[in-house]
Each structure stands twice: as structure tokens, then as C-alpha cells.
Amino acid sequence: MASLRPVRRRACPACPATLGQSPDATEDMLDVENKRMADSLASKVTRLKSLALDIDKDADEQNRYLDGMDSDFMSVTGLLTGSVKRFSTMTRSGRDNRKLLCSVSAGLIVVFFILYYLVSKAGT
């Protein structure tokens, strides 16, 4: 059975940085390079972690905003449903309410066109 002995890193004979250097100096140089690269990697990981935390915070804020919008839309839906029910009740009732409904509708249309005209003139 072959004995296991530790393998020692040897300098690359073709590498210009290792020519004329002892194996210990080459090993020290490689260790320094490894530490520099490890530090660089650690800083990149730290930046990625902070970016991920910022994304998480932003997603939470957007979810809260959307939840608020959902409740606002639900309240508007309730208001519109009530208005439609009242409108339907008014149209089903007697002839007097129909005349009132037509005059209110015509008035709203006239007000809309007046406002449209005023806004278009203010914009130019």
C-alpha cells in the first residue's frame, strides 16, 4: 500500500512571476493573491446581500400600497353599487321621476361639455 504524503504546491516553471523565486516565496505570493480574491468576493457578497434586502423592503412597501388600493377599490365598488341600485329604483318608479332623471342627465351632459370647453381653452 502506498503511503500518503502531503502534496506541496510547486511553482510553475513557465510562469514569469515564479522564475528565480523559492517555492516558499511563490507559496506566500499565492496566499496573498488568494486572500485578496477572497476579500474581493466577500465585498461582492456583502453588496449582493444589501441589494437583496433592499429588494425585499421595496417589495413589502409595494405590497402594502397594493393592499391599500384594494381596500379603496372595494369601497368605491360599494358606493357605485349603491348608486346603481338607487338609479334603478328611480327609473322604475313613476313618470315624474323619469322627467327628473332626463333633466338631470341633460344638465350633467351640458356641464360636462362646458367643463371640457374650459379645460381645452386653458390648455392652449
Image (cartoon, helix red, strand yellow):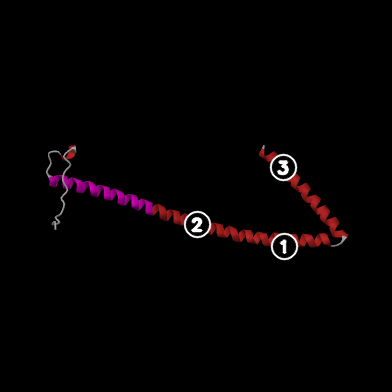
Q: Position of residue 67 (x, y in %)?
A: 56, 60
Q: Position of residue 69 (x, y in %)?
A: 59, 57
Report which quarter residue 86 is drawn in. bottom right
* Three-letter amino acid code of the residue under disc 2: Glu
- Left or right of residue 91: residue 116: left
| Label 1: few (<14), some (14–19) or many (≥20) C-alpha neighbours in 10 Å | few
Label for residue 118? 3
> What secondary structure is the magenta-colored segment mainly?
helix
The residue drawn where x is 83% and y is 61% is 92
Tag 3 and tag 2, C-beta contact below 8 Å: no
| Label 3: few (<14), some (14–19) or many (≥20) C-alpha neighbours in 10 Å | few
- Left or right of residue 63: residue 42: left
Alpha carbons under labels 3 and 2: distance apart: 39 Å
- Left or right of residue 63: residue 72: right
The residue drawn where x is 87% and y is 59% is 96
Which of the two discs, 3 and 1, labels the residue nearer the N terminus?
Answer: 1
Secondary structure under tag 2 reads helix
The residue drawn where x is 77% and y is 59% is 87
Label for residue 82? 1
In the rendered structure, which segment of residues is drawn in magenta? 23-49
* Three-letter amino acid code of the residue under disc 3: Leu
Secondary structure under tag 1 reads helix
- Left or right of residue 61: residue 1: left
The mark closer to the camera, 3 or 1, is 1
